[in-house]
Image (cartoon, rainbow, N blue to C red):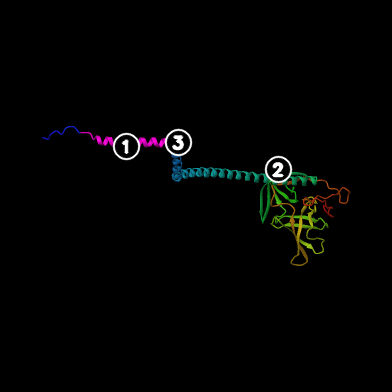
Amino acid sequence: MPSYAGPTTPNRGGDVAGTLRLLAYLALAVVLIVLDHRGGWLDQARKQASLLVQPLWMVAGWPGRIAETLYDDAGTLSQLTEENERLRNELLVNSARIARLQTLDADNARLRALLGAARRGNLDVQLAPILDVDLDPTRQRLVLDAGANDGVQVGQSVIDAGGVVGQVIEVTPMHATVLLLTDPSHAVPVAVARSGVRLVAYGDGRSDVLRLPSIPLSSDIQVGDRIVTSGLGGRFPAGFPIGTIISLRPDDSRAFLLGEVRPAAQLDRGRDVLLLRTLPARPPVGSPDAVSIEDPANPTPASPPPGAGR
């Protein structure tokens, strides 16, 4: 059985040493406080230490600043993307509006030209919208959005602001079909406005040209002469513009000339035409009141062609 050793005796030497160290620290702290209060050197030391530590603070703050920059850039990019999309949509809408306004302006210009042609000729006309266009080389037709219910009749002459377009060949209650001057089966008696030479213009299946075959070599006709309706046959009134001669050449027999005419009417464009309803009374040629229908492409009134309308 072990013997009892008794209670542990405390190490008083260690306690004394610890107490002395604590007193020494307190004394040093008091000295430092007094010195700092009088000389301020501790504050200077803190400033110098903060200068030395400042680069470390900057390096430590880099991740936060980078993250904040990336967040701001992401937000700015998102805003710019949304604004760009909005501006693109607005541009498309404005472009569509501008195109629509340009179309309306062109339509108004065409309507003003049609109205001007009717007023200049003192004509009783009816405005008819174009519903369909057939410019096949073997079939040149217009379908109008006006028919028998609107007073349209077979045989009516059709014009636009430039000149003769064709004639009505078929009428239904709601629509009318117009045979264009350029149809291969169409022919119209014409006259040279300058000299009064009578010819016949034929369609060639092209919307930009008419044919003048079998022109006598002795005829007074030149490139640039204006061609108008002669009034022969009673289908078209005399004096309406047909076109302008753009070329003359001998035929294969060398006995006649072949001419080409550029139509005055816009046969391959436009959205409306005029139907002649009541023809104006034309005074006899040579009377003081005799005037010709004014060419819309040339606002200067021309003298009535000799023999026109006879």
Position of residue 98 relative to residue 198, above or below, is above
Magenta range: 9-34
What secondary structure is the stretch in magenta mostly built from?
Answer: helix
Q: Three-letter amino acid code at disc 2?
A: Ala
Q: State the quadrant of the N terminus.
A: top left
Q: Position of residue 3 (x, y in %)?
A: 12, 34
Upstream in sequence: badge 3 or badge 2: 3
Position of residue 33 relative to residue 69, above or below, is above
Q: Position of residue 296 (x, y in %)?
A: 77, 50
Q: Label 1 belongs to which residue?
A: 21
Q: Three-letter amino acid code at disc 3?
A: Arg
Can I make out residue 275 in this image?
no
User: How far apart, in angstroms, are the residues tagged by discs 3 and 2?
Assistant: 119 Å
Q: Which numbered mark, 3 or 1, is in the foreground of this view?
A: 3
Residue in the image at 40% along x and 37% along y? 32
Question: Dot 3 surroundings within 10 Å: few (below 14), some, or many (20 or more)?
Answer: few
| Outermost residue, left side | 1
Say left or right for 27 vs 175. left
Disc 1 is placed on an element classified as helix
Q: Which numbered mark, 1 or 2, is in the foreground of this view?
A: 1
Q: Which numbered mark, 3 or 2, is in the foreground of this view?
A: 3
Residue in the image at 32% along x and 37% along y? 21
Say left or right for 144 vs 300. left
User: How far apart, in angstroms, are the residues tagged by discs 3 and 1?
Assistant: 26 Å
Question: Dot 2 surroundings within 10 Å: few (below 14), some, or many (20 or more)?
Answer: some
Q: Three-letter amino acid code at disc 1?
A: Arg
Task: Determine contact: label 3, label 1, CB under 8 Å.
Answer: no
Disc 3 is placed on an element classified as helix
Q: Label 3 belongs to which residue?
A: 38
